[in-house]
């Protein structure tokens, strides 16, 4: 009976993984090319963002169903409970996107899904997410995605509730401990300190972030700011360093937001746009002429991929702030040979218009590969530190005992591979942190 329930749940879960993840974002090259021509890229992203919700909307009711069977039909039998939990853990961990999907589910709810819900209803939604998170072996991968999604919510002011955000972090702390959530709490602290700082400096709004807390890569792209904003940036730098001498500020303009007041034929609108989008718009402030794609690349200083993304937002059907030649419908992605002009006849019932930035989505194959490479590097560092910490305390240990101890200590972060632990031990021997004892090559000794 236990095997039958285990097998049934596993079959359902594997079928779900197969059918759901066949509809993920990556497409063959020829299909992706067709999307560029037909303008379907936005639809692809929306389908991608909804994948997490669809996966969770199947797994959660399945979990509820078998919990009810366990409670009402099997009298809470412990052996059956173990089989059910093992089945869920198996198919969830076989899906290499599960950590990302759960984080996206939480992200969607903390942005939009909890609006209008009571405190108890919000707590129930977060508890559902945590109940599946418990099954995930690679909690460090979940942490990486959660930090990325949280940073977007905080920096773009998209959180529906600070209380719900803090409640979610508290639940993760209960599950994984203080070390797991320390950087998440640090991110919240940065936002609070930045808010306090802006009470003293009201010219512009700046969020000062501690680099070790936030999942933000070192700035590799930039843009040419208008003189008025460049001067404001310099003034804030002087203001900040007068209070915190010895610190270094690096401006991540690609993550900023600007409010631009634009006069169209019919009326004036306030456009809330990313900083890079503002840099593009400013090129059309003194001319009604067409501007070529090549000229925009040169005058804005924006990397080509970023420029394409911002031009897409400014020429799409939802908010056609700019005109495009050839038209957006024919070729939505800007490229060499295209040209753009200000659309003075733009109309909208809204006075304030937000030019939306891309929502969090499932990573593409190349992005996920880069993420996993960073995760692997971090795991090597954590494994090395764990081995050294244990050996420094014990001084000498047998190989199997050391591997078991390292595995036990790292399980709260990820499930380490014994072969990889062995490789890290060999690396530490090469770097003269450890050595094999002379009388037993399977026994290691710590070198002070």
Image: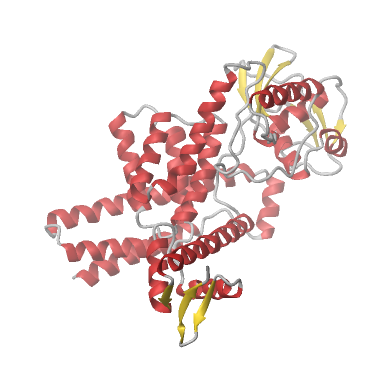
- Could you tell me which residue is drawn at 73 percent across and 25 percent down? 233
Could one spot residue 58 in this view of the protein? no
- Could you tell me which residue is drawn at 61 percent across and 18 percent down? 352
In the figure, is residue 31 to the left or right of 409?
Answer: right
> x, y percentage for residue 124?
30, 39
Tell me the colour scheme of the image.
Answer: secondary structure
Quarter occupied by the N terminus: bottom left
> x, y percentage for residue 339?
84, 35
Which is more toward the observer, 87 or 216?
Answer: 216
> x, y percentage for residue 169?
40, 40
Vertical placement of residue 385 versus 211, above or below: below
| Outermost left residue | 75
Which is more toward the observer, 371 or 109?
Answer: 371
In the figure, is residue 365 to the left or right of 3?
Answer: right
Q: In the figure, residue 79 lies in which quadrant? A: bottom left
Vertical placement of residue 125 versus 386, above or below: above
> x, y percentage for residue 237?
71, 26
- Could you tell me which residue is drawn at 71 percent across and 36 percent down? 310
- Could you tell me which residue is drawn at 41 percent across and 51 percent down? 55
């Amino acid at each position: 009976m236990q095997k039958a329930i285990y097998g049934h749940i596993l079959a359902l879960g594997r079928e779900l993984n197969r059918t759901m993840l066949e509809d993920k974002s990556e497409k063959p090259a020829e299909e992706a090319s067709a999307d560029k021509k037909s303008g379907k890229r936005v639809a692809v992203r929306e389908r991608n963002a909804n994948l997490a919700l669809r996966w969770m909307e199947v797994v959660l009711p399945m979990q509820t169903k078998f919990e009810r069977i366990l409670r009402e039909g099997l009298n809470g039998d412990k052996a059956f409970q173990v089989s059910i939990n093992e089945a869920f853990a198996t198919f969830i961990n076989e899906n290499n996107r599960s950590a990302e999907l759960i984080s996206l589910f939480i992200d969607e709810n903390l942005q939009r899904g909890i609006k209008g819900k009571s405190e108890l209803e919000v707590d129930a939604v977060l508890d559902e997410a945590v109940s599946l998170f418990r099954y995930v072996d690679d909690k460090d991968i979940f942490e990486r995605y959660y930090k990325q999604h949280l940073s977007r919510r905080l920096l773009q002011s998209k959180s529906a509730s600070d209380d719900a955000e803090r409640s979610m972090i508290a639940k993760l702390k209960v599950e994984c401990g203080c070390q797991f959530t320390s950087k998440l709490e640090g991110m919240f602290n940065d936002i609070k300190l930045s808010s306090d700082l802006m009470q003293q400096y009201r010219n512009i709004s700046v969020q000062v972030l501690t680099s070790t807390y936030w999942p933000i890569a070192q700035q590799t792209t930039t843009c040419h700011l208008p003189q008025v904003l460049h001067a404001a940036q310099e003034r804030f730098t002087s203001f900040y360093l007068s209070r915190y001498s010895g610190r270094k500020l690096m401006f991540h303009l690609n993550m900023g937001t600007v409010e631009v007041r634009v006069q169209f034929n019919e009326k004036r609108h306030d456009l809330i746009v990313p900083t890079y989008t503002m840099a593009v718009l400013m090129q059309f402030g003194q001319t009604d002429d067409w501007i070529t794609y090549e000229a925009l690349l040169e005058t804005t200083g924006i990397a080509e991929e970023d420029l394409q993304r911002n031009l897409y937002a400014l020429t799409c059907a939802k908010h056609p702030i700019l005109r495009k030649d050839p038209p957006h419908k024919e070729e939505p992605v800007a490229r060499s040979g295209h040209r753009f002009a200000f659309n003075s006849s733009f109309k909208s019932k809204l006075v304030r218009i937000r030019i939306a930035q891309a929502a969090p989505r499932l990573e593409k194959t190349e992005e996920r590969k880069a993420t996993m490479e960073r995760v692997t590097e971090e795991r090597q560092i954590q494994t090395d530190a764990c081995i050294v910490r244990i050996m420094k305390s014990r001084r000498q240990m047998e190989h199997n005992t050391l591997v078991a101890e390292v595995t036990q200590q790292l399980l709260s972060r990820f499930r380490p591979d014994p072969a990889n632990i062995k490789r890290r031990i060999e690396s530490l021997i090469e770097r003269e942190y450890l050595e094999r004892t002379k009388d037993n090559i399977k026994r290691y000794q710590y070198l002070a």
